[in-house]
Image (tube, grey):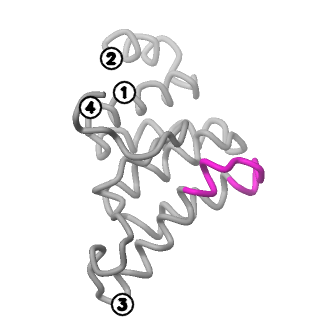
Amino acid sequence: MNQLRHALRLNPVNAYANIDAGYILLLLKRPDEAIPFFREAVRIKPFYAKAHNNLGAALAQTDRLEEAIFHFSEALKIKPDDTGVRNNLIRARAERDIRSRKMTPNSTGVISMRERHVDPALDRGPVDQSGR
C-alpha cells in the first residue's frame, strides 16, 4: 500500500494506481477508505468500466445502494457484456428492493451485500471463510 501511495504522490492522475489502492483497501475490508480512490479513478477515466464497477462495489459494501446501482449501471453502459458487473447490479437492486419492503434477507434467500463479497474486478462468488 505504501508503494501505491508513493506512486500516487508522484503521479496523482494515475487511474490504475487509484484502482489498485482502492482494491487493496477492499481486500482489507476497508471500503470507506477505498471509495475516494475509486472516485478519483472515475474522475480521471470516466469511461473506464472497471473504475465504475469498483466504486459501485465499495459503495454497496457501505450500504450506499442507490449510488452503487448508479455506478454499476454506468459500468454496464460502457461494457454491456460484462457479466460480473451485471451480477453486481442485480444483487444491489435486489438488496435495495428487500430493504424498501422492510424484509429480512434470510426470509427471501437473498444474501445481503454486506454478507456477500462483491468483487470489484472479478466476480468469483462468495468468499470461502474456511480458507479453502
Distance CA(mark 1)–CA(mark 2):
7 Å
Residue 119 forms part of the magenta stretch: no
Magenta residues: mostly which secondary structure?
helix
> Is residue 128 toward the left or the right of residue 65 in the image?
left
Q: Nearer the viewer, mark 4 or mark 2?
A: 4
> Which residue is pictured at 30% across the width and 85% down the height?
103
Q: What's the mark number on residue 28?
A: 4
Callout 2: 10 Å neighbours few (<14), some, many (20+)?
few
> Which residue is pictured at 47% across the width and 25% down the height?
20
Circle nearer the N terminus (1, 2)? 2
* Whether label 1 touches label 4, CB < 8 Å: yes
Residue span colored magenta? 76-87
Which of the image's four quarters has the N terminus?
top left
Q: Is residue 6 above or below residue 74?
A: above
Q: What's the mark number on residue 24?
A: 1
Q: Nearer the viewer, mark 4 or mark 3?
A: 3
* Whether label 4 touches label 3, CB < 8 Å: no
Circle nearer the N terminus (4, 2)? 2
* Whether label 1 touches label 2, CB < 8 Å: yes
